[in-house]
Amino acid sequence: MDEVAAFLGYLAGTLTTISFFPQLLKVIKLKSAKDISYRMFVLFILGVLLWFIYGILTNAWPVILTNLITFIVASSILVLKIRYDREDSK
Amino acid sequence: MDEVAAFLGYLAGTLTTISFFPQLLKVIKLKSAKDISYRMFVLFILGVLLWFIYGILTNAWPVILTNLITFIVASSILVLKIRYDREDSK
């Protein structure tokens, strides 16, 4: 049962993480991220970070690993957004 | 420790769920959802559904409840997208 749960967790995490990659690729390709709301994205990244800590506290590896990857992808999008928004306002 | 973890889990779930509401509101307001990719959104909804099952198997209530709400919000966006895309193609 634990193995089934872990497998489902990793599969779930893979799917929800994968769904963020097109956003990252779009931002890189367009060199723009005006469509993304700062406020909502910061809330989301904060949420992912809390899921990561929740995973550590409850010893849930699928939660820890997949949220770590989502955190890296989402933070990359945010850093690119800050950079591109600055360039646009020059 | 368990209570701290549960609190963090609910807070995490609230933040990651909240970050989806602007998308729903935007789709309702614009009566259009052309920016949203079907393929990625279906993957995401499938992922959320698997997180929900993972939560049941591991008895993790924050995971169960917040993914249930995200599933409802994301499915609503998908249903609206199907409806608006049909209307546009008439």
Image: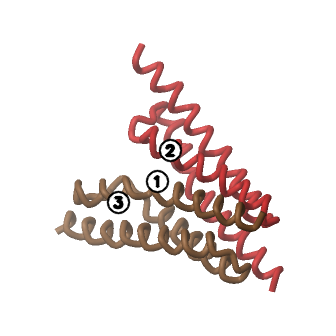
Chain colours: A brown, B red
Instruction: Choose between A35 and A22: the one closer to the eye.
Output: A22
Q: Residues within 10 Å of mark 3 (few under 14, many from 20)?
A: some
Query: What residue sits right under mark 1 in the picture?
Result: A19
Chain bearing mark 1: A
Q: Secondary structure at mark 1?
A: loop
Instruction: Choose between B89 and A8: the one closer to the eye.
Output: A8
Query: What residue sits right under mark 3 in the picture?
Result: A24
Q: Amino acid at mark 3?
A: Leu
Tell me if label 1 and label 2 are in contact, CB under 8 Å.
yes
Residue at the location (54% across, 67% down)? A43
Instruction: Choose between B10 and A83: the one closer to the eye.
Output: B10
Q: Amino acid at mark 2?
A: Phe
Across and down, in percent, residue A8 comes to 65, 58
Image quadrant in which you'd find residue B16: bottom right
Across and down, in percent, residue A16 comes to 53, 57
Across and down, in percent, residue B22 comes to 53, 50
Instruction: Choose between B26 and A10: the one closer to the eye.
Output: A10
Label for residue B88? none
Q: Are marks 3 and 1 on the same chain?
A: yes
Residue at the location (51% across, 36% down)? B29
Q: Residues within 10 Å of mark 1 (few under 14, many from 20)?
A: many
Nearer the N terminus, badge 3 or badge 1?
Answer: 1
Residue at the location (52% across, 47% down)? B43
